[in-house]
Image: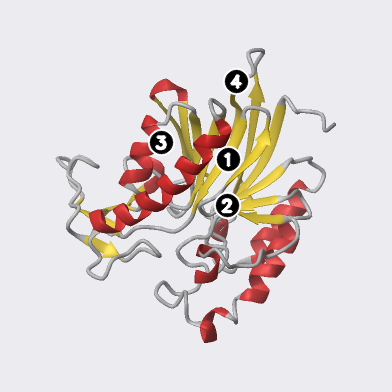
Amino acid sequence: MKEEKNKIKFLVINDMHNRIQNVEKVISKIKSEKFDYVLCCGDIVNVPTGDNADKSIIDSYMPLMYNIFLELEKIAPILWVPGNHDPYIYFTNYYKEITSKSKNLHKKFEKLSENLYIVGLGGSTPMLNGGKWSKDFIPFKDINFEKYKYPGYPYNNSSNNYIESDNMLLKDFNEVLNEGKKVWGESRLIFLTHNGPIFAPTNSMEYEDEYLYLGSKSIGDIFQNEENCFINIHGHSHLSEGYITIRQNKHILNVGANYYGNYGKLEIIKDKEGKWNVFSFSIEYV
């Protein structure tokens, strides 16, 4: 019988956008360390949003995805979700896995240990424009859900309407959660997503005098209301790396884009009552 761990260590990496050289630098830097899993929040490659289903385009990216994952699995088995710049096939039920040591968790869940599951959802909703930055501007309160800056993928309706697009995401997330609740009961949950909660500073940024919101309202609502979920690990927002704790000791973390050399280390630990909590977290750079 496999021995149950009381501590699990993750390498967290995402938003490579083709830069395998940065992945190689990470592997070289941490090769003497032991990790249980690699967690990847997507955007492994850089397929132009909207061309994700164009076979003539995505075929050219597939060898690079494969080689990036071959590098990562030198560290540990990979659990991942696709981002809005990854090929469409990884959002479907008929995809083949990239390597033998990787598992796509989009709309799926995985048991990591006793009383511990990880739940995945890839993709993004449209990026919103919060308006011009000023001393009177209040992030999130002044958000304009009617005005989008960039489209999302695959959660993007024909008019780029944010609420309708986010409802598409909500439908998919509820499907996996409703299925999982039949299995995990009162176990602790980790959400692995590409989009993060829209209210979090790890998923918004000031850019060219505008405040941009890259997250999902639905992910934020579910994360706050799902009592057993204690971590949301996400990517997508390249310039907003960070770690925050909100009410009920819930943690949101974004290690930032490996495109710029970022990656992270996360350790969780099980207490005497069998409850999992964050033990340590750090953002690193190559």
Give the amino acid type for the residue marked by disc 2 in the picture: Leu
Q: CA distance from mark 1 to mark 2?
A: 8 Å
Residues 58 and 96: in front is 96
* Residue 114 showing in the rendered view: yes
Q: What is the number of the mark on residue 118?
A: 1
Q: Residue furthest top?
A: 272
Give the residue type at disc 1: Ile
Q: What amino acid type is highlighted by mark number 3?
A: Phe
Of all residues, the one furthest to the right in this rendering is 1
Q: Residue furthest bottom?
A: 56
The numbered dot on residue 223 is: 3
Q: Disc 1 and disc 4: Cα gap in Å?
A: 15 Å
Give, as a three-letter code, the residue at label 4: Lys
Mark yes or no: residue 209 visible: no
Q: Is residue 84 left or right of residue 262?
A: left
How dense is the environment of label 1, judged by Cα within 10 Å: few (below 14), some, or many (20 and up)? Answer: many
- Location of residue 145 in the rendering, given as x and y in whole percent from the top left corner: 20, 53
Distance of label 3 from label 4 (alpha carbons): 18 Å
Q: Are marks 2 and 3 in contact (CB under 8 Å)?
A: no
Mark 3 and mark 4 residues within 8 Å of each other at the beta carbon: no
Picture coordinates of residue 261 (x, y %)?
59, 55
Instruction: Tell me the distance, in whole angstroms, between the alpha carbons under discs 1 and 3.
Output: 13 Å
Q: Quadrant of residue 161?
A: bottom left
Check the picture and name the quadrant holding the N terminus: top right
> Which residue, given by chain and number where applicable, does mark 4 sit on?
275
Task: Please give left or right for residue 38 compared with residue 260 in the image.
Answer: right
Mark closest to the chain's N terminus, 1 or 4? 1
Give the residue pinned by disc 2: 105
